[in-house]
Image: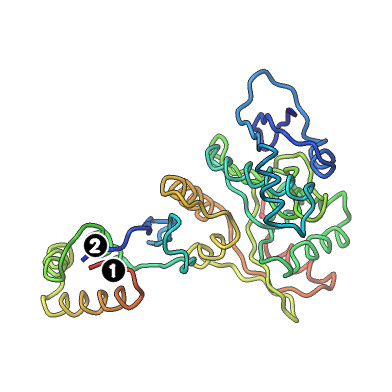
Amino acid sequence: MHKLRVADIDLLIKYKYDTMLKQAKFYESEFEKPMLTIDIPDEMLEQWHKESPHLTIDDIEYVYTGASFYEALLHFNGFMLHSSGVVKDGYAYLFSADPGTGKSTHTALWQKHFGSDDAKIINDDKPAIRLVEDKLWVYGTPWSGKTDRNINMKVPLGAIVFLERSENNWVKRIEPKEAIPLIMQQTIRPAEKDRMIMLLDMLDRVLTSVNLYRLGCNISEEAAEVSYNGIRVEE
Amino acid sequence: MKIKDGYLLREVAGSNIVVPIGEGEMDFSGVITLNDVGAFLWKNLENDTTEEELVEKLLKEYDIDENTAKKDVAEYMSSLKGAGFIAD
C-alpha cells in the first residue's frame, strides 16, 4: 500500500504498475491514519482487464484507481470535471469538452503563448474541485488522462469554460442554467440518490460562485489571447 | 398515476432540474429543466395522484382560473406521458 496526499485527502492506496508508480510519485506523503483507502482486489482488475482486452493491466489499474478516487471525492465536498486545467495569475481555469475536441490543445496554446512558467497545467484531463473552508479549490491529481501533465498543487477556481471548435475565436459568458447540462455531461453521474444529491448540491455551489463561459476556438496562438482576455478573473 | 421511480428533482443554481438515477431507465441520460409550475406538479406526482387533484392543488398554489389550470395540467400530463415518465 502507498501513502499519498491527493486534493488534501490522506489516501492509502494499492497499486503496483508503472503508470501509477510514475504518476503518483509527486503525491507521496506520510500520515498516521488515512482519510480514504482504495484497495482494489487483483481479481477485480483481472476481471476488468478481461472485459477490456485492448487495454493493458497497467492502464486498467490507472483508470480504476482514478475512478475509485473520483467517486469517493463526493464525500469530501468534491467532484471531478473532465477538463484541462491551466493556472495563470494564481487562478485555475478549467476548459471542459468531450474527448477529441481540443481541450489539451487549447491549454498547450496558453503555455506556448504565455510561457510554461506563467501558464501551468494543473491537470490535463481530470482535475479535482473541492469546497474547503467555504472556498472552491482546484487540485492536481495523479490521474490526468493520456498525458502526465498534472501538478500537485491547489489553486482557487477562476472560471469554467465549455470549449468548442470554431473558425474564429470568441468567448461568451453563459448563465448557470445553460451550464447545467454541459457540466453534468463532463463529470461522473452517481447512480445512487443520496450521492446524486451530493453532486447536485456541489454543482449548485460551483455554478453560482464562478463565472461560466463558452469558448469557440481554433488552434492559432490568438486563441489563447482571446480566451485569456475573455475569462480572466479581474482583481 | 405517478412519476416512475428513478428520477430526482432538485433545484440547482435557480433551475428546477430532473435527472435519472439508479440502474433503471438509462436510455435517458440528459437533464430536464422544469419551470416552477412544472416542478410543483412533478413534486405532487411523486406520490400517486389524479389529474383532478393536480388541478385542485394548482388552483390553491397559483392565482389562475380553473380552465387555465385544467388546460395546463392536461398539457403537462400529455407531455410527461409521451416522454414515458408516468406509471399508471
Where is residue A69 shown, x and y percent of the image?
63, 41
Residue pictured at 47% horizontal, 52% vertical: A191
Q: For this rendering, which residue is in front, A160 or B88?
A: B88
Q: How many marks?
A: 2
Residue pictured at 54% horizontal, 51% vertical: A206
Q: Which residue carries the number 1 mark?
A: B86
Task: Find numbered disc 2 in the image and state the secondary structure of the residue it sits on.
Answer: loop
Q: Chain of mark 1?
A: B
**Which one is in front in this view, the residue at disc 2 or the one at disc 1?**
1
Q: Quadrant of residue B11?
A: bottom left
Q: How is the image coloured?
A: rainbow
Task: Look at label 1 and name its amino acid.
Answer: Ile
Q: Chain of mark 2?
A: B
Task: Find numbered disc 1 in the image and state the secondary structure of the residue it sits on.
Answer: strand
Q: Which callout, 2 or 1, points at the residue further toward the start of the chain?
A: 2
Q: Residue B45 has which mark?
A: 2
